[in-house]
Amino acid sequence: MANHLTQFDPFGDMARFEPLRGVEDFFRDLRNKHVLRDFDAKPLIRLDVSETEQAYSVRAELPGMKKEDIKVDIDGKRVSIAAETKRESERKEGETVVRSERYVGQQYRSFTLEQDVDDVKAVAKYQDGVLELTLPKKTNSGARKLVVN
């Protein structure tokens, strides 16, 4: 028996519907256009994560950000990085404003590590568009064996 994959086309039946023959081109064009074609995709925060027996090291690319606008949250094994940027530019010719652009954007990245992070000893540094996190692993000193009486 051969397995075959078929592509699902939700507008296919509607495009072939005879009474709406004039609408056929509309649905064909709609199928072929990417929904986000006109929008600029927000860049993801790119990460490099490495691990030793004592700690995790994270390098996150955040170009053009100010360190005051970067927030790092640690909750057990979960690490979240959020950054917000605000840019304004204005171009004047004489006294008339020819162009004014404002940009406000947020980036967010969250990931889970294999072991809990000691948030008290964690360190974050930001330089030249790169956020470096040193995340020491929590020791499992809270675990203990019970003696059965």
Image (cartoon, helix red, strand yellow):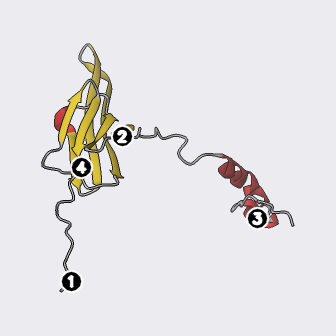
What residue is at 19 percent from the left and 76 percent from the top?
146
Report the side of 42 relative to 131 (left or right). right
The type of residue carrying mark 2 is Val
Residue 34 in the image: state x and y as whole percent: 60, 46
Q: Quadrant of residue 115?
A: bottom left
Marks 3/2: CA–CA distance? 47 Å
Outermost residue to the front: 149
First of labels 3, 2 by sequence position: 3
Q: How crowded is mark 1: few (under 14 residues within 10 Å), some or many (20 or more)?
A: few
Q: Quadrant of the N terminus?
A: bottom right
Which residue has dot 1 on it?
148
Marks 3/1: CA–CA distance? 69 Å
Q: Is residue 69 above or below residue 138?
A: above
Which residue has dot 3 on it?
13
Marks 2/1: CA–CA distance? 42 Å
Q: Residues within 10 Å of mark 4 (few under 14, many from 20)?
A: many
Q: Residues within 10 Å of mark 2 (few under 14, many from 20)?
A: few
What residue is at 19 percent from the left and 69 percent from the top?
144
Of circles 4 and 2, the one toward us is: 4
Instruction: Return the residue nearer the eye: 67 or 79.
Output: 79
Report the side of 46 relative to 55 (left or right). right
Label 4: which secondary element: loop
Which residue has dot 2 on it?
49
First of labels 2, 1 by sequence position: 2
The type of residue carrying mark 1 is Val
Outermost residue to the top: 94
Residue 75 in the image: state x and y as whole percent: 23, 57
Label 1: which secondary element: loop
